Image (cartoon, rainbow, N blue to C red):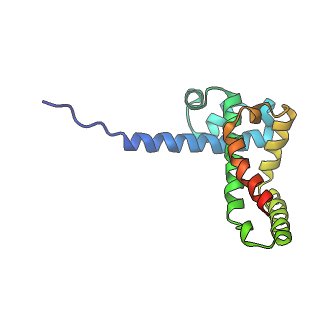
Amino acid sequence: MSAPPIATEPRLRDAERSQAAILLAAREEFASFGLAGARVDRIAERAEVNKRLIYYYFGSKDDLFLAVLEQAYADIRNAEKQLHLLEMEPAAAVRRLTEFTWEYYLAHPEFITLLNSANLHLARHLEKSQRVQEMNSPLVQTLGDI
């Protein structure tokens, strides 16, 4: 008699859902209290997960902070892609990017507070992130092309 097949899809969805909930709760916590003032206990409570699950997925509070920063950069870079800057005249493209950036900061004040917190720690988290460097490269290339 063979064992029943292992159901991995629901578990995977639960893992993805838990990680997304943790990242969202952590973003709110870090934006409100900075890296130093943020508490993993509060993040776990907000995400409605066990605190050990945070360490399982992210390793440490510093690594969770980096994951939040990476997601924040991914969000703004994905939004910038929707601008189609290369289809505009150079002056219009630079103006649109500037307007977009200002509007994005107003709509997402947590982005600025997260960057402030990262800068207070001399960007040591961002320096470790290959992902953020890769996300910034296309924007730098686009500006060069403009």
- Name the quadrant of the C terminus: bottom right
Residue at position x 22%, y 35% from top?
4
Residue at position x 83%, y 72% from top?
92
Near-viewer residue (83 or 66): 83
- Name the quadrant of the N terminus: top left
- Vertical arrangement, residue 92 with respect to residue 19, above or below: below
Instruction: State the image quarter where residue 134 is shown.
Output: top right
Instruction: State the image quarter where residue 45 is shown.
Output: top right
Near-viewer residue (123 or 43): 123
User: Exactly how many numbered labels are in the figure?
Assistant: 0
Q: Residue furthest front?
A: 145
Residue 85's x, y, as percent?
74, 67
Near-viewer residue (45 or 89): 89
Residue at position x 68%, y 61% from top?
81
Q: Residue furthest left?
A: 1
- Vertical arrangement, residue 74 with respect to residue 33, above or below: below
Residue at position x 49%, y 39% from top?
15
- Vertical arrangement, residue 51 with respect to residue 15, above or below: above
Left or right: 50 in relation to 76: left
Left or right: 35 in relation to 75: right
Residue 129's x, y, as percent?
70, 36
Residue 30's x, y, as percent?
75, 39
